[in-house]
Image: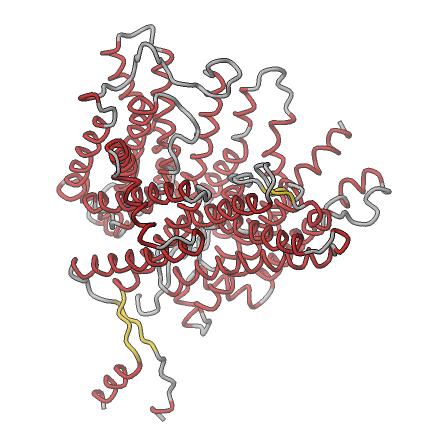
Amino acid sequence: MFDFLLTFIPRAIVQGIPLLYGSTGETLTEKSGNLNLGIPGIMYVGAISGVIGSFFYESSLPSPEAFSGFLAVLITLCATLLGSLLMGLLYCFLTVTLRANQNVTGLAMTTFGVGFGNFFGGSLIKLSGNNMPYLALTNTSMAFRAPMPGANTTGWFGSLFLSYGFLAYLAVILSLIAAFVLKKTRIGLHLRAVGENPATADAAGINVARYKYAATCIGSMIAGLGGLYYVMDYASGIWSNNAFGDRGWLAIALVIFTIWRPNLGILSSFLFGGLYILHMYIPTGMDLTVKELYKMAPYVVTIIVLIISSIRNRRENQPPASLGLSYFREER
Amino acid sequence: MANKLKEPLIHISRRSVLPWYQSWGIRAGAVILSLGVCALVTMLTTGENPFSVFGAIYDASFSTQRRTWVLFQNIAMLLSVSLAVVPAFRMRFWNLGGEGQMLAGGLASTACMICLRDVLPNAVLIPVIVVCSIAAGAIWGMIPALFKAKWGTNETLFTLMMNYIAIQLVSFFIIVWEMPKGAGQIGIINQNTEIGWLPAIGGQKYLLNIIVVAVLTAAMYVYMNYSKQGYEISVVGESVRTARYVGIKVERVIVRTMIISGALCGLTGMLLVSGTDHTLTTTITGGRGFTAVLVAWMAKFNPVWMILTSFLLVFLDKGAGDITTKFGLNRSFSDILTGIILFFIIGSEFFINYRISFRHSAKKGETDHV
């Protein structure tokens, strides 16, 4: 049993990290009153931007010996942050400045982002010139996946807690910071005020548009890192089209599951990761059909949480009051 | 003191309702502008001149009779789902579950085609298929509505999750019914007997679907604009409090409307499975449940304008698909083009709803005050 957990938990955690990034980013965004349904697209764009950055870095090298892990990580991270920042800015420009409908904008961004990822992914695969339907960036991925020191020498402790790449720890740190900022700082208080009632926040002298822009753009950048983690760490640097799947929507589900609290997201995302791969570990014998039903688990659990939190109707567990609505000062 | 006040360069104010020709003029302008950007993007990626690109887009839909039929079939299916989500959206109920409701309908008709093929004669089976798939879609749409009506559960996220449950349910049954065993797909159902297939009117297998959707469009227009229920939906959408005040049972309207919405999605799923594809896959819906949101929203939830917007999206999608094969690009290129066009149309709504005045005109207003 212990051995089973030792293999299962690390795999659940690496499954959960992209979801954790996505849900931390989306929580920040939603706290400002923006329901960004473009997160799945943004995660694709974040992933492919990183892949593009690392591809051009790897292919610009005169020889494989010149490869520098630090530079590769830096370039890839910057490319990802830039790509997802641009998507966040686009969303803000349309919904905050132009006051467009958030659901429609988000869905259009998901269409665009997934298309963008698959198009440039496909083009890079072609550029790389091999006949495989995927692109392998093994060197950069090695730099991303380097485990913490001591992972191999400390036995079960090492494999449970130290065996991940640095992006996994960054995800946990970011969500703790997000929880702290939201709950304990003045900036967080202002941000929550903007999400609950922008007119009141405006009257109190808070710059609503600036908070919405900042929260949504930072949220997009965090979500983009989730896409990058998936490609570089989970998938070992192998990009193949549509491999990321529906994880973006699962990240949005996780926001509800955690009732808008990033610190709860850490354990919940690992739980979701576990549910996502549960079907591989359930002994069903030769009957493969049942596995398809186990794959429903994360979605069913999300719906149950959604229902329970709406039935209990406690004020601190509700979505931000102005979630999904644009704010226009002259419209009262 | 007064002239020390900082005056913003741009002043934005809400417009009163624009005449329809002006607002559609702005939208048309946005489409033309976005096509320009699309042409630029295509030029940069293919190196082809934009006119031959637009020629290729046109050819993709109209060069042969067969392609035109496929174009109209795709428009009909997209329009059908869009019609289904309209009543929900008018009520401000964000039904993002079109995909799942379609799959539920498709699954029900597949189940009827497979399980009842030896039990019922074809003439009885087809009505059974129609009823079952409509019921399946209605149930799938009703579940989130019940919770929304009773406890105010967030419907956007609930319907979204229901999509994935439906997808997993379909992939479960695909393995149950896979043909041959181990293939991982159902294949064409009843290929030899054609039991449970909708009749092909005049030898055109798409004609029946197109007629059904045309009738649905007219019916939905009448329902939304001239029926009591349609009026109730608009009142609930405008203000739940007003609706309660005038004695509309809001909960009942929510559930009833979502049953209609889900039922039409289920019907669309049936048209796809029994009408044209004669098989069931998890991707049979082709993302139409999401695209329908955009189609309906772009047309301001007006069924007649939706013919135009669904035509636009399908036409461009087919065109972009053709370009990609012609120039050896990736199929996803069409998603990028669709995205660009949508961004422009979404952005153009701002200029329909708001007036922008610059500083000098504001100054004029101030001197009038003095």
Asked if one can make out residue A221 in the rendered structure from this viewpoint, the answer is yes
| Residue in front for this viewpoint, A94 or B57 | B57
Picture colour scheme: secondary structure
In the picture provided, is A132 more to the left or to the right than B2? right
**Considering only vertical position in the picture, is A102 above or below A331?**
above
Please provide percent x and percent y for residue B325: 41, 40
- What residue is drawn where x is 29% and y is 18%? B129
In the picture provided, is B176 more to the left or to the right than A134? left
Q: Kindly give the residue lying farthest to the right in the view shown.
A: A153
- What residue is drawn where x is 29% and y is 26%? B271
Q: Quadrant of residue B214?
A: top left
The N terminus of chain B lies in quadrant: bottom left
Q: Kindly give the residue lying farthest to the bottom in the view shown.
A: B1
**Considering only vertical position in the picture, is B117 above or below B59?**
above
Q: Kindly give the residue lying farthest to the top in the view shown.
A: B118
Please tell me how many numbered marks the rendered image carries: 0
In the picture provided, is B217 more to the left or to the right than A120? left
Asked if one can make out residue B251 in the rendered structure from this viewpoint, the answer is no
**Considering only vertical position in the picture, is B91 above or below B17?**
above
Please provide percent x and percent y for residue B202: 17, 21
Q: Quadrant of residue B128?
A: top left
Please provide percent x and percent y for residue B290: 37, 42
The C terminus of chain B lies in quadrant: bottom left
- What residue is drawn where x is 29% and y is 48%? B55
Please provide percent x and percent y for residue A20: 60, 47
| Residue in front for this viewpoint, B257 or A99 | A99
| Residue in front for this viewpoint, A13 or B203 | B203
- What residue is drawn where x is 43% and y is 40%? B160
Q: Kindly give the residue lying farthest to the left in the view shown.
A: B226
